[in-house]
Each structure stands twice: as C-alpha cells, then as structure tokens.
Amino acid sequence: VQLQASGGGLVQAGDSLQLSCGASGLTFRTYTVGWFRQAPGKEREFVAAIKSYNNNNRVYTDSVKGRFAISRDSAKNTVNLQMNSLKLEDTAVYYCAAGRSVIDLSMKRNQAYDYWGQGTLVTVSS
C-alpha cells in the first residue's frame, strides 16, 4: 500500500490550494482518510478527515473550519483537501493517512490510521 500526497507549494496569504492524496493498493471508499500537518518545531496535528463509506461524515479541526474542505473522488481513488483563505499559520508539511477501522471518536487521532503518505509542503507567505 502506498499513499501519495501532492499539490503543495508556495502561496500568499489569502490564496487557495488543493492537495490531493492518491493511493495504490487500497480503495479509498473503504477507508477513513485523514489529513494531518506538521509545522516546523511542532507536533503533527489533525486537520480533516472523511469517514469510510460516508462522504457526509467529515470532521475538521477548529482552525480550518469554514476554510478547508475534504472530499473523496471514488472514480479517481483520491481524497482532496481544498484549502481556501490560507493563513501564515497553515504553513506545514501536510500528510494524508488512511485507516481501515476508524471509529468516529478516533478520526482525529493519528494512531487510528494504518497508512501514511510522504507529505507535501505548503508554505504560506505574507
């Protein structure tokens, strides 16, 4: 199983960016998929997740609610993270992760996920 995160880059504050997570060896529809991020000198933190089999079950960390949107494209077997109104504090390496049996209460916990991508860097400048 391999996850591949892509779409990162250098943008200005207020801009938008879309990250994409692709997978080989698993079908995203059957997995809960999460996005996490790690800023320099900080611990990895949860950003957003979408539940397996249920595109309507999505959770976000408070700091990105209303700005970020996670979605799943089953035809392409990808999970995307649309990031709008980016802020300086959104600068981080973003990781996607997939978990086979993630209960709702664990969607924000990195320990609940089985597979991780390599990360893609998002840099927001002023």
Image (tube, rainbow, N blue to C red):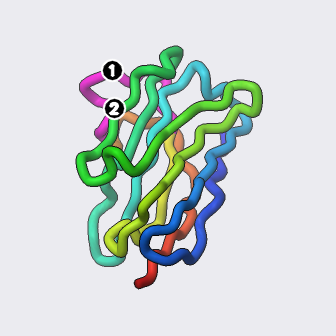
Q: Assess whether residue 124 is covered by the magenta stretch.
A: no
In the picture, the disc for residue 7 is none
Q: Amino acid at mark 1?
A: Ile
> What's drawn in magenta, residue-wise?
98-109
Q: Position of residue 105 (x, y in %)?
A: 25, 25
| Residue lying furthest bottom | 126
6 to 62, vertically: above or below: below
Q: Position of residue 107 (x, y in %)?
A: 33, 32
Left or right of 100 on screen, residue 3 = right
Circle 1 sits in a helix, a strand or a loop, which is it? loop
Position of the C terminus, as image quadrant, is bottom left
Whether residues under marks 1 and 2 lie with C-beta atoms below 8 angstroms apart, the answer is yes
Q: Amino acid at mark 2?
A: Met
Tag 1 residue: 103
Q: Assess whether residue 103 is covered by the magenta stretch.
A: yes
Position of the N terminus, as image quadrant, is top right
Tag 2 residue: 107
Q: CA distance from mark 1 to mark 2?
A: 7 Å
Query: Badge 2 local density, few (<14 within 10 Å), some, or many (20+)?
Result: many
